[in-house]
Image (spheres, grey):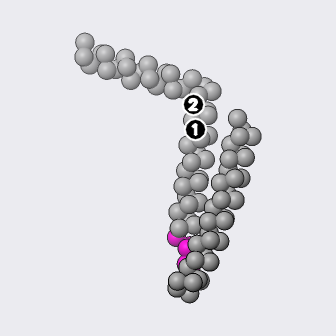
Amino acid sequence: MLSFLVRSLLIAAVLVHRLQRRLDARSARVRPSPQAGQATAEYALVLLGAAAIALLLAAWAARSGAIGRLFDTVVDQLIGKVG
């Protein structure tokens, strides 16, 4: 599972790098600014980090059985409020 996450993160990093190069090249044609595409690349990196954390959290929760316990707790509380 961990090797899958590492490979996914590496692939995503390469894609972000390529996207940033394309945006920089496109921005250079439209408006010559050294910061062109910077916000988009930063946004993509933040999303990449959030996705990595979410994948790690989901892998941990699936492995530890936390999802089942959480679901059971929520259902028990709902039944307790109804009954």
**Dot 1 corresponds to which residue?**
57
Decide: is 63 above or below 47: above
User: Is 31 contained in the magenta span?
Assistant: no
Quadrant into which the C terminus falls: top left
Which residue is pictured at 58% across the width and 38% down the height? 57
Q: Amino acid at mark 2?
A: Ala
- State which quarter of the image contains the N terminus: top right
Q: Report the residue that reaches farthest toward the left.
A: 82
2 over 76 or under it: above or below: below
How many other residues sit within 10 Å of disc 1, few (<14), some (14-19) or many (≥20)?
few
Viewed as shown, does residue 63 lie left or right of 3?
left
Residue assigned mark 2: 61
Check if mark 1's residue and mark 2's residue have beta carbons within 8 Å: yes
Q: Which residues are magenta?
A: 35-39
- Residue at left 67%, top 50%? 9
Quadrant position of residue 53: top right
Left or right: residue 38 compared with residue 79: right
Measuring from the top left, give residue 30's x and y in whole percent. 52, 83
Give 79 or 1, whichever is nearer the viewer: 1
Q: Position of residue 22 (x, y in %)?
A: 62, 71
Chief secondary structure of the magenta span?
Answer: loop
Q: Callout 2: helix, strand or loop?
A: helix
Please say whether residue 33 is visible from this viewpoint.
no
Q: CA distance from mark 1 to mark 2?
A: 6 Å
- Under mark 1, the amino acid is Leu
Can you give x and y, in whole percent of width and height, for residue 72 in the image?
44, 19
